[in-house]
Image (cartoon, rainbow, N blue to C red):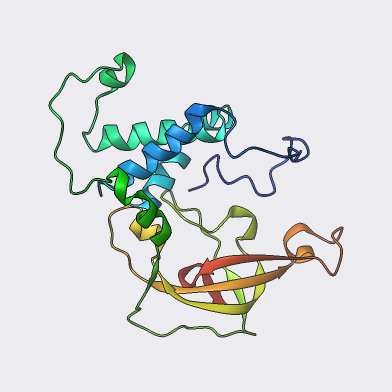
Amino acid sequence: MNGPQDLGGQMGFGAVAPEADEPVFHAPWESRILALTLAMGAAREWNIDKSRHARESLPPAQYLGSSYYKIWTDGLIELMVAQGLVTREEVASGRMSTSPKKVAGKLLAKDVPAVLAKGGPTSREADAGPRFKPGDKVRTRNMHPTGHTRLPRYLRGHVGEIVRLHGAHVFPDTNAHGKGENPQALYTVKFSAREVWGEARHPRDTVSADLWEPYLEPA
């Protein structure tokens, strides 16, 4: 979706100002939110793509006015409310007032190192082989879905070159909405900066993005 998270090419936000010696967390509550988000993922009430969509679906003013982990907090609350794990009244009061809902899984403290080491691999076997190969010219589709997508707006409708095939991976656009993993070929596509940003860009500059096959058509 063309939500507030899709900031590539947007203007008016000022220059990026990297923070010297930036800490992993700027406040203790941020590490707790990360832990809560990972722990709640183990409940198997949603997947990573659905959790991303919950964050990007926050109202634009709320999203753009929030810190990184405040966005995670608000997204997690929306997921928990949607799944019936908590009510908005309980969130506001900080007290449980309804019986807990049984979930499919849970993350125990002793299992955390192994779970984090395993990660969340998304590679799968696809029903069909890849349509493109390295060296092929492709054009990204001009699409504006209301649901989740990993194709950023600034790359839509542009011509690039396939430079790498990564095999088949879970397709976020369907997985985020309960429509199945639908594995699709995933490619690294290289674009000329001039193709994307115009003639003022340096001719040797390029932009590369990992894009799923349904985002692409032959050019």
Quadrant of residue 84 in the image?
top left
Q: Position of residue 6 (x, y in %)?
A: 58, 46
Whether residue 57 appears in this view of the structure is: no
Q: Position of residue 131 (x, y in %)?
A: 48, 83
Whether residue 95 appears in this view of the structure is: yes
Horizontal side of residue 146 vs 11, given as left or right: left
Question: Which residue lies at the image location 74% right of the left edge and 35% below the top edge?
Answer: 12
Which of 143/177 is in front? 177
Q: Position of residue 187 (x, y in %)?
A: 54, 74
Is 4 located above or below residue 42 in the figure? Answer: above
Which of 121/192 is in front? 121
Quadrant of residue 109 in the image?
top left
Question: Which residue lies at the image location 27% right of the left edge and 36% below the top edge?
Answer: 82
Is 23 located above or below residue 184 in the figure? Answer: above
The quadrant of the rendering that contains the C terminus is bottom right
Is 114 located above or below residue 187 in the figure? Answer: above
Q: Residue furthest front?
A: 110
Horizontal side of residue 36 vs 212, given as left or right: left
Q: How many marks?
A: 0
Quadrant of residue 207 in the image?
bottom right
Question: Which residue lies at the image location 55% right of the left edge and 35% below the top edge?
Answer: 68
Question: Which residue lies at the image location 48% right of the left edge and 73% below the top edge?
Answer: 213
Q: Position of residue 182 (x, y in %)?
A: 33, 68
Horizontal side of residue 55 vs 210, given as left or right: left
